Structures are given as C-alpha cells and as structure tokens.
Amino acid sequence: MTPAERERLLVRILDALSDPRSAMAEGRPHHKAKVRAIDMLTLHFGSTGRVIYLAEELAVLYPGEEVFAPDILAVLDVPQPEDDPRMAWVVADEGRGLSMVLEVLHQGNRNKDLVANVERYARLGIPEYFVYDRLRQQVHGYRLPEPDAARYQRIVPQMGRHASSVLGLDLAVVGDRLQFFHGMAELFGSADLIGRLKGMMESLEARTEQAQAQAEQAQAQAEQAQAQAEQAMAGLREAILAALSMRQIPCQDEARARLLACQEPATLQRWLLRAMSAGSLDEIFAE
C-alpha cells in the first residue's frame, strides 16, 4: 500500500468512526456486557496460553468494503500485544480476516445486527458470528458450514449453549448475563474473581476469628480445670491435716512442707487414707 493509499484509508476510517450514527452509544448495559465479555475472554486465553487476538470496537476494513467496528472481534493465531498500536484491522495489511465477531444488542438497530450483519459477515468469510441480545436475554449464533461458503447456518444450541468452534467455548445466557463455558466450567471476569477472592478472604477471616475464639475458650476451660484441680488438692491437704489433728498426731514443719508441696492428687489421696489409720507420720508419708 502506497503512502497516498494509506492516507486515503486513514481518512476513510476516521470518517467512519466520527459518524454520529456509528458513535451513538447504547448505554451502560451495552457497555458493561461488552466489557465483561472481552474481560472473560482475555483472562481465559491469557491463562491457557492460546494465541488469539481480541479487540473491542476496533475499526475493520476489508478490501472494497465500508469500514465497520464490531463490539468484539477475534482473530486466531495472532498474538495479543500488551500495548496494541493498531488503530484499525486492515485485512490487506494483516493478511487475514476476522475469525469471529460478537455483537451486543441492547437498544440498537436490530435489523443491522440480526439481518444485515448476518449477510455481510458471511459474505466476508468470517467463520462465526454471535449476537448477544441483552434486551431479550438471547444468544444468536451463526457459522459458515464450509470455508468457501457465503451464507451462514444457524448454530443450534445444545442444552441452552451455543458452541463456538473458533473460541473453543460455549456461549449461554445465565440469569441476566452472557456467560462463557469451557467444558462444564464457567469463565470468570476480573470483577467475578475479585468478588470470589474477597469472599474467600472474608471466610478465612471468619474461620480465623472462630479458631481464635475456640482457642481462647479452650484456654479458659484449661485454666478453670487447673483451678478446680488446685482447689481439690487444697481440700485433700486440709483433710489430711484435720485427720492428723483429730488423731492427735503432730505434723512437724518438714512433713507440713512436704504436704503443701505435693501436686499429685493420687499421692494426696493415698496419704489421706493412711492418715485415717496410721499411727505416725512416717507411716503416712512412707514411699
């Protein structure tokens, strides 16, 4: 392409993108659905390592055709640059056309997305075309039956899912949102992952607090048990001293110190039994 041809091409693209009818937004619902869809796809293919180029509202020019800017486009086997310098996808320069187009329809031109684009994208040889009708919560899928076909065939949903051979994913409406599936697994967007991570953190914090409360409760119970054991041993010591006093057996300082120092309930119980019948301290404290 000569510099003059490229300049004329750029003028055509800028004119198309500055057309008020083309630039007219469909509102926040349309924008959110489109952004969420490309976010899910970008995260999925980034994690699987599959080489696929994704873009939203990128101007596309086929030879001899008017410029158009689909909501989401995909091109297989083209790397996704971190800082994409493309201002448009020019088929003559890229050497290949689009592999898949996804349009989000909310309050826009239904005839354009569901009739005109079906004919146009098939004629351009785009293998797959999907429309997410957000207003009616439906998915429409179209596929070329053969590489050289010029008319789409409808993709028949299976269990409510439309299979995309290009993406290797299924599309379906779940609740009030467009959802992608890889096998039985749902794809998640950044907001979904952040929400799940936040939920996991909150659950972890709750379990940590519960474990801490249980540990504190166990410590309190252990302290209570220790206090009860000490009270029981104190009672045994008092009972031994009372038995000695009742039987008029003097308790010398050394024996008293040994009695007060003993921390074994079984030993104190044995001494108490002996104190009821023994005739001397030696018999009571004998090993």
Image (spheres, rainbow, N blue to C red):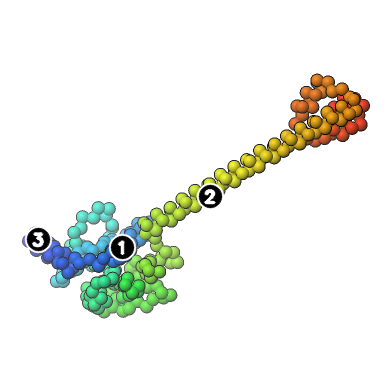
Which quadrant is the N terminus positioned in? bottom left
**Label 3 – label 2 distance at C-alpha:** 63 Å
The numbered dot on residue 207 is 2
Residue at 37% across, 69% down: 176
Which quadrant is the C terminus positioned in? top right
- Point out residue 259 in the picture as x, y percentages from the top left corner: 79, 27
Is disc 1 placed on a helix, strand or loop? helix
The numbered dot on residue 279 is none
- One can see residue 45 in this view: no
Residue at 18% across, 68% down: 22
**Label 3 – label 1 distance at C-alpha:** 34 Å
For mark 3, what is the residue? 7
Mark 3 or mark 2: which comes first in sequence?
3
- Point out residue 111 in the picture as x, y percentages from the top left corner: 24, 77
- Amino acid under label 2? Arg
Residue at 20% across, 58% down: 86
Most distant residue in the top direction:
253
In this orientation, which residue lies closer to the viewer: 279 or 70? 279
For mark 1, what is the residue? 32
In this rendering, the answer to whether 259 lies above or below 57 is above
- Amino acid under label 1? Lys
- The answer to whether residue 174 is left or right of residue 242 is left
**Label 1 – label 2 distance at C-alpha:** 35 Å
- Amino acid under label 3? Glu
- The answer to whether residue 276 is left or right of residue 19 is right
Q: Residues within 10 Å of mark 1 (few under 14, many from 20)?
A: few
- Name the front one of labels 3 and 2: 2
Picture quadrant where residue 11 is located:
bottom left
Residue at 9% across, 61% down: 7
